[in-house]
Amino acid sequence: MRAFLETDRLTLRPFRESDADDVLALDSDPEVMRCLNGGEPTSREEVLREKMPALLRHYPCLDGRAGVEGRGYWAAQDRSSGAFLGWFEFRPLRDDRCDEVELGYRLNRRAWGRGLATEGSRALIRLGFTELGVLRVTANTMTVNQRSRRVMEKAGLGYVRTFFEEWPDAIEGSEFGDVEYAVTRAEWLGGGAAPKD
């Protein structure tokens, strides 16, 4: 399957049905899932019923822009070995408009601490602002998720707000709420939200 985007160390490509086992392994790691659901593994049934349809979802407003197939989630592979590392999200917040997208990432532990989440995020933001017509990129995480917050900052997003939502099941740290980060195209072009190393 043709790559959507390549960086120095990553290949991002459209998801396919055959990725279900890799998604199951990713979502079964308690450390990967700690700030998402308290570390509970995801069942095969949930992956097939909920996760894969979301990862395979089509977004018509992205069709044809910069040769992009209208997807909002991209499987991340190690560019040299082809090994599955996880995924990146660059998903329109509305079905009919692509001017505002949500950035997200979920990588397996062997990819942590190597700057891969930042590398992929920067590449997606650059593509969004230069070729996809994106005007604003937003991202959310738990307030206590310092690793993810650091990726957002290094990718050029700035803190917007802290907010509180009802969690179906409270997990450790949820009492501190969630944070939103964002960057606009104007900020990115003007260098006001330059990535931090």
Image: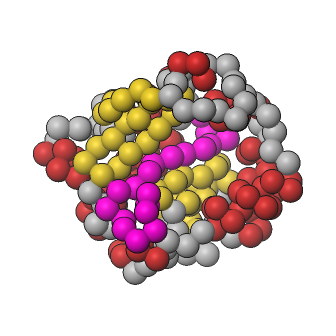
Residue at point 35%, 49% (across, down): 137
Give the mark count.
0
Q: Residue at x 26, y 62 (%)?
A: 130
> For residue 94: magenta?
yes
Q: In the image, is 186 to the left or to the right of 56?
A: left
The C terminus, quarter of image: top left
Indicate whether 168 appears above or below 79.
above
Residue at 67% x, 41% y is 108
> In the rendered view, would you say 8 is above or below 141?
below
Q: For residue 170, which quarter of the picture?
A: top right
Spot occupied by residue 70 in the image (x, y as percentages of width and height): 49, 73
> What's drawn in magenta, residue-wise?
92-112
Residue 13 against residue 10 in the figure, above or below = below
The residue most toward the front is 166
Q: Quadrant of the N terminus?
A: bottom right
Residue furthest bottom as drawn: 64
Its colouring scheme is secondary structure
> Residue 159: x, y in percent?
33, 30
* Residue 103 part of the magenta-drawn span: yes
